[in-house]
Amino acid sequence: MNGEGFWFNAIYIERIQSNPDTTITTTHGKRFVVKESEAIVIKKMKHFYREIGLLRVVDKAGDSIEE
């Protein structure tokens, strides 16, 4: 929210909530408030999962997610 960027491993995302700020909760219980919308966070997560090979089965099944 302060304009400072950061990265963390999307595999550890447990929950994403919009209320109205987008809050990401990790599997370790840490919470991050981000300026991106919930839809953008999910899109970025899916892109990451594809890059590391976790969504290949979904892609082959015909589910396309627009980028």
Image (cartoon, rainbow, N blue to C red):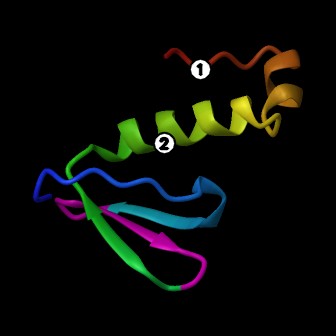
The quadrant of the picture occupied by the N terminus is bottom left
Q: Which residues are magenta?
A: 18-28
Q: In the image, 1: left or right of 42? A: left
* Distance between mark 2 and mark 1 Cα atoms: 11 Å
Residue 22: x percent and y percent? 27, 58
Q: Residue, x 49% and y 16% (percent of image)?
A: 67
Q: Secondary structure at mark 2?
A: helix
Q: Residue, x 82% and y 34% (percent of image)?
A: 53
Within the image, what quadrant is residue 21 found in? bottom left
Report the disc number at residue 65: 1
Q: Residue, x 13% and y 50% (percent of image)?
A: 3
For disc 2, the neighbor class at 10 Å (few under 14, some 14 to 19, many from 20) is: some
Number of marks drawn = 2
The residue pinned by badge 2 equals: 42
Query: Which residue is more in the foreground, 14 or 12?
Result: 12
Q: In the image, 32: left or right of 56? A: left
Q: Amino acid at mark 2?
A: Ile
Query: Which residue is more in the foreground, 12 or 63?
Result: 12
Residue 27: x percent and y percent? 60, 77
Report the disc number at residue 3: none
For disc 1, the neighbor class at 10 Å (few under 14, some 14 to 19, many from 20) is: few
Q: Secondary structure at mark 1?
A: loop
Residue 61: x percent and y percent? 87, 19
Magenta stretch holds residue 37: no
Within the image, what quadrant is residue 59 found in? top right
Q: In the image, 44: left or right of 58? A: left
Query: Which residue is more in the foreground, 5 or 49?
Result: 5
**62 lies above or below 32:** above
Q: Give the mark, 2 or 1, whose residue is nearer the N terminus.
A: 2
**64 lies above or below 33:** above
Magenta stretch holds residue 27: yes
